[in-house]
Image: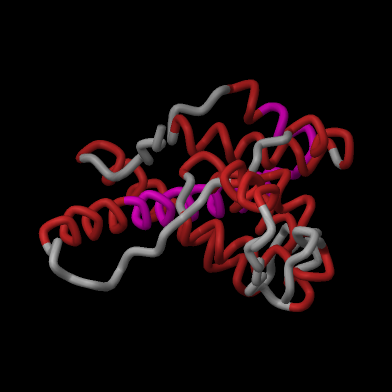
Amino acid sequence: VRKVKRTFDFDNLFTLLAAVLASSPVLLAALLRPKTSAALREKVMLGATSVTDCRYCAWGHGHWALANGVSLEEVNQILGQQTESLQARDPAEAAAILFAQHYAEHLEQFDPAAIDNLRSHFSEAQVAEILAYVRTVTLGGLTGNTLDSLLGGMMGSFWWWPFGKVPEVSAGQLEAMRKQGPALPQLVDVRTSQEWRSGHIAGAIN
């Protein structure tokens, strides 16, 4: 079953635009003197992306997280919402990531407990910065999903167009193909060498 991704509607579009506008002074200040690390910034961005499921955000912030020292394993844990592992590693970062997930789900309807948990680990300035990042990436995620939805509808009208579709298989289908033999599929991993070294499927080539 294909998951229906959240896109813009009349209410959430203006809610998010107003929220990001309210956080714009914090975002501008963070460009010059950030109150949180670049790694934490990317982790909370990925936390929100795990809910919006925007493929552009997942790709971009996944790469930026790796560039800022976040391991591929942790990137996958955040996108997979494996909160137990995150909490065991760093409760403060887990609180920020959980807040990001909560925000992406409920937008400006904050859970007081989520805010209190965030404030127990970070200063007010850091909380404001985390909130600004989460608001921004949630706006970006819904923008990406809305764009995909519009493009998908347009491409459906051009049934004769020979490009634009790439056959996909699930992890289970790939595993079944690998067991059928004797002509096994060759896996080509197109990520960077750094990502390759962090972990890859056995038998794949970079």
- In this orientation, which residue lies closer to the viewer: 178 or 63? 178
- Residue extending furthest toward the front: 182
Magenta segment, prevailing SS (helix, strand or loop) = helix
Q: Is residue 30 left or right of residue 35?
A: left
Screen quadrant of the C terminus: bottom right
Q: Which image quarter holds the N terminus?
A: top left
Image vertical order of residue 61 relative to residue 67, above or below? above
Give the side of residue 139 with respect to residue 88, left or right.
Answer: left
Q: Relative to the observer, which residue lies in front, 174 or 44?
A: 174
| Residue at 69%, 59% in the rendered image | 182
Image quadrant in which you'd find residue 84: top right
Q: In the image, is 197 to the left or to the right of 180?
A: right
Extreme residue toward the right, this view: 89
- Residue 37 among magenta residues: no
* Residue 34, position as x, y percentages in the image: 69, 65
Q: Position of residue 169 (x, y in %)?
A: 51, 51
Tell me which corner region of the image, top left, top right, bottom left or bottom right, holds residue 111.
Answer: top right
Q: Give the residue displayed 60% in from the left and 62% down from the top.
A: 61
Q: Which residues are magenta?
A: 116-145
Question: Toward the viewer: 88 or 199?
Answer: 199
**Residue 55: where, in percent of width, then height?**
47, 56
Q: Give the residue displayed 48% in from the left and 46% down from the top.
A: 53
Question: Residue 133 magenta-drawn?
Answer: yes
The answer to whether any part of residue 112 appears in the image is yes
x%, y% of residue 41? 67, 57
Q: Residue at x 63, y 44 (%)?
A: 176
| Looking at the image, residue 20 lies above or below residue 88 | below
